[in-house]
Image (cartoon, rainbow, N blue to C red):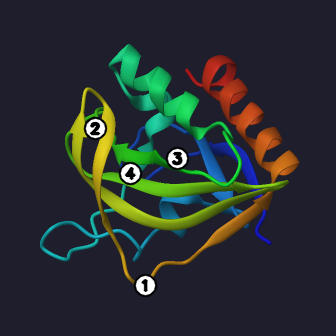
């Protein structure tokens, strides 16, 4: 079982710390290094920032927050996690995860790169074959998500 939490962290291309999720105490943008590749097979994850809090389109932003919330059990959801800080939208590199809820466990089954979106919804994903998997106790995941929202709404300036 992995641990998940939220903290403030300064990504490579940002000027100040911002809220991030951490997996096993490693910022998600660093943890995902070597996992998501672009169409040419290059790792383009360096400097990605959370989709939650960075998307400039209000509808896309609401969607990114809503879809991260644990949903129906035994179903998978494709969650946009990271985007380029310069773009602040879902048009460029978007790192996604297939999230599955199984009783009191949240599983990040596999990671990939969104290759198509329609109205801010990821409709196609290029999955990486060599994927790490992460799983969290649902209570800890919900606490981390709550703290992530609090940091985004009240601490990030």
Q: Which mark is residue 90?
A: 2
Nearer the viewer's eye, disc 4 or disc 1?
1
Nearer the viewer's eye, disc 4 or disc 2?
2
Q: Mark 4 points at which residue?
A: 48
Q: Which mark is residue 115?
A: none
Q: Name the residue under label 3.
A: 10
Q: In which quarter of the image is the C terminus?
A: top right
Image x and y of residue 48, in percent? 38, 51
Closer to the chain start, of discs 4 and 1, is: 4
State the CA–CA distance, disc 3 to disc 2.
21 Å
**Residue nearest the observer in this picture, 73 or 97:** 73
Closer to the chain start, of discs 3 and 4, is: 3
Q: With respect to residue 55, does 92 lie above or below? A: below
> Dot 4, crowdedness within 10 Å: few (<14), some or many (≥20)?
many
Image x and y of residue 67, in percent? 54, 35
Q: Is residue 102 left or right of residue 35?
A: right
Q: Is residue 36 left or right of residue 137?
A: left
């Amino acid at each position: 079982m992995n641990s998940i939490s939220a903290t403030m962290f300064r990504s490579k291309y940002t000027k100040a710390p911002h809220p991030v999720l951490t997996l096993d105490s490693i910022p998600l943008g660093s943890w995902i290094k070597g996992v998501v590749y672009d169409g040419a097979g290059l790792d383009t994850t360096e400097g990605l920032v959370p989709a939650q809090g960075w998307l400039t389109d209000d509808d896309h932003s609401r969607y990114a927050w809503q879809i991260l919330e644990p949903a129906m059990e035994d179903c998978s959801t494709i969650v946009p996690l990271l985007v380029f800080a310069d773009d602040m939208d879902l048009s460029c590199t978007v790192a996604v995860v297939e999230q599955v809820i199984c009783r009191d466990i949240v599983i990040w089954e596999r990671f990939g790169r969104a290759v198509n979106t329609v109205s801010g919804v990821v409709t196609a994903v290029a999955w990486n074959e060599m994927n790490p998997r992460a799983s969290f106790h649902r209570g800890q995941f919900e606490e981390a998500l709550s703290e992530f929202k609090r940091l985004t709404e009240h601490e990030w300036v």
